[in-house]
């Protein structure tokens, strides 16, 4: 079986794969960090690739924030979508891979953008690792 492709293109502004809009002025940097973290995590897994498009998946991630006293709790959620989009009845649509996972979180005290970006990068890598077995199993059903 050829390597499983994971789409990392975040250029569609109407349907972003990496959404960190809750971070305000740091959103663009966080989205870039998320994209880099996905590519980095998958580069270490031999049966996945991010540079040779084919049948595979997109990982849609979103950053959520929650105030915890003087700190902020960051959560990065993940959805696994089949790639490319499916065409049914003449319309293109997304096909979500059913999975149940509890996203991790990180609490950062203070306003250091570097600390926030590091936390989001690590949460993103954890999401990728948790998604690998789901994508492998689902690929056998396609």
Image (cartoon, rainbow, N blue to C red):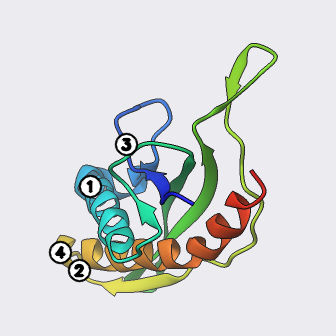
Element at badge 2?
A: helix
- Real-space CA distance between mark 1 and mark 3, rounded to the nearest whole angstrom: 11 Å
Which mark sits nearer the N-terminus, 1 or 3? 3
Q: Name the residue under label 4.
A: 114
Q: Name the residue under label 3.
A: 9
Q: Name the residue under label 1.
A: 32
Which mark sits nearer the N-terminus, 1 or 4? 1
Q: In this view, does 109 lie above or below 89?
A: below
Q: Do the residues labelled 1 and 4 touch (CB within 8 Å)?
A: no
Which mark sits nearer the N-terminus, 3 or 4? 3
**Where residue 96 sits: x, y (%)?**
71, 49
Q: Which of marks 1 and 3 is in front?
A: 3
**Where residue 69 sits: x, y (%)?**
45, 86
Q: Mark 2 points at which residue?
A: 115
Q: In this view, does 10 lie to the left or right of 73?
A: left
**Where residue 44 sits: x, y (%)?**
34, 77
Q: Which residue lies furthest to the top in this view?
A: 90
- Real-space CA distance between mark 1 and mark 4, rounded to the nearest whole angstrom: 13 Å
Element at badge 1?
A: helix
Q: Are marks 1 and 3 in contact (CB under 8 Å)?
A: no
Q: In which quarter of the image is the N terminus?
A: bottom right
Element at badge 3?
A: loop
Q: Are marks 4 and 2 in contact (CB under 8 Å)?
A: yes
The 10 Å Cα crowd at callout 3, few under 14, some 14 to 19, many 20 or more, is few
Which mark sits nearer the N-terminus, 3 or 2? 3
Q: Nearer the viewer, mark 3 or mark 2?
A: 3
**Where residue 94 sits: x, y (%)?**
67, 37
């Amino acid at each position: 079986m050829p390597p499983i492709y994971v789409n990392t293109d975040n250029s569609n502004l109407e349907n972003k794969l990496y959404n960190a809009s809750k971070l305000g002025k740091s959103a663009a940097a966080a989205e870039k960090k998320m994209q880099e973290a996905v590519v980095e995590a998958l580069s270490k897994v031999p049966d996945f690739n991010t540079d040779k498009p084919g049948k595979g998946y997109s990982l849609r991630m979103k950053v959520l924030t929650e105030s915890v006293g003087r700190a902020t709790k960051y959560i990065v959620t993940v959805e696994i979508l089949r790639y490319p989009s499916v065409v049914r009845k003449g319309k293109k649509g997304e096909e979500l891979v059913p999975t149940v996972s509890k996203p991790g979180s990180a609490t950062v005290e203070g306003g250091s953008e570097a600390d926030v970006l590091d936390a989001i990068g690590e949460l993103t890598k954890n999401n990728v690792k948790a998604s690998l077995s789901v994508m492998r199993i689902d690929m056998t059903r396609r």
